[in-house]
Amino acid sequence: MYTAIVFPDSYSPFLQELQLGLYLLVSETITYPLDRISTRCIAKQNKGSILFHKEYIKIFQEIIQKEKNKGLFHGLKSRLDQSISKIVIRYYLFQLLYYNFAHQNHVFEGFKPENQLSNIDDQPVLTPDNPHIYPLLLYSKIDFKLLIINGIAGLVGQICSHPVSLLKIKTQCEPLGDISQTSLKDVQKMIDITKFHDNKKLFWIKAAFWPRFVYNQIQFNLEIYFFQQYLERNQYEFINVFKEEKQTQKDNFLLNIIFNSVIVTTITQPIYFYYIRKSIAEIQKVKYGLSECIQNFKNEGIQMPLKGFLPNLLKSVVRNTICTGLMWLSAKRSNLNRFIE
């Protein structure tokens, strides 16, 4: 039961990334208020409740009181600019490298052309013979080449998107209701920050670069791993290996997304906290390393790394539900005969 991976003429990586990009922009817009609340909570160097739920409510109320409803979306443009640059550079480069160097890893090494079945509709595998499932194909197997390709694409994408990431954090932390700041255009803000840093333009690349890179890589690879485990548990196959048919209880895909989001967000939360706190400090020309973080930990208590966790978790659940969920439904509609129901 083998099937060769064939790229159909109708496949377009650009159109697939455009589709995923639209889903991502929608999710980023919906969850942006959570992102701003999370960042402002992390910026506060004070003790709080265990999960900081009281602090989130207070920050939300302060934003509404001083900036009205539109204040919840202050800095959204920078966030969307960051997402667009990440999509265009990182994901497209990832696909380009993947299709040129790694997709053959999904072909079973013992495959021979004569083993391919003429009628594949009855196979209990999801075969990549139409373009709708390719975005999911990328996440069906982890190997060394995939990790290297993801690292290269992530590095290039982050270099391009890092300046607007810093600008977003700076905008989110501006004093509430300060017209002199909120009325400035993003370009002027970047000019002012550059002057503040003695016209050192490399600041926009160097500030908190590696914590963000480590955070993004761990998050990405964990999400690939958990998605692969879901495929294995439910006998969905993208790679060409023989899989014996078994009667299994199907996991609920939505519940799986929520569960995986909780696990990945929990694991990466300390790194995310450090990345945001370091970004805020370096924007202000304040040194912030592990020794400063440890001192903050002593002052703010054991719950310090959980600052921003709940908004970050909700943001992750919504993003993964919209992006991964819609791509999965698209694949299922296009391959109904190849999914075991």
Image: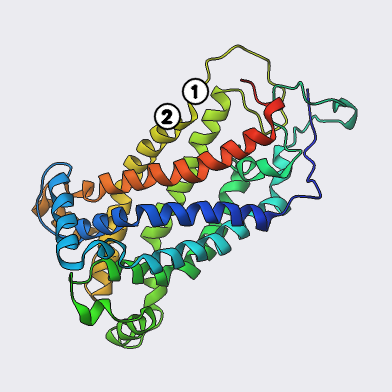
**Residue type beneath disc 2:** Leu
Is residue 328 in view? yes
Where does residue 218 sit, x and y in percent of width and height?
43, 47
Q: Which mark is residue 156?
A: none
Left or right position of 174 against 244: left
Q: Which mark is residue 255?
A: 2
Is residue 214 in view? no
Local crowd size for mark 2, using a 10 Å CA cut-off: few (<14), some (14–19), many (≥20): few
Where does residue 245 sit, x and y in percent of width and height?
67, 14
Residue at image point 21% right, 57% down: 42
Left or right position of 66 against 185: left
Residue at image point 40% right, 68% down: 77
In contact (CB < 8 Å): disc 2 and disc 1: yes
Q: How is the image coloured?
A: rainbow
**Residue type beneath disc 1:** Asp
Relative to 60, say whether 245 is above or below.
above
Residue at image point 76% right, 21% down: 122
The quadrant the C terminus occupies is top right
Residue placed under numbered mark 1 in the picture = 251
Where does residue 104 sit, x and y in percent of width and height?
74, 43
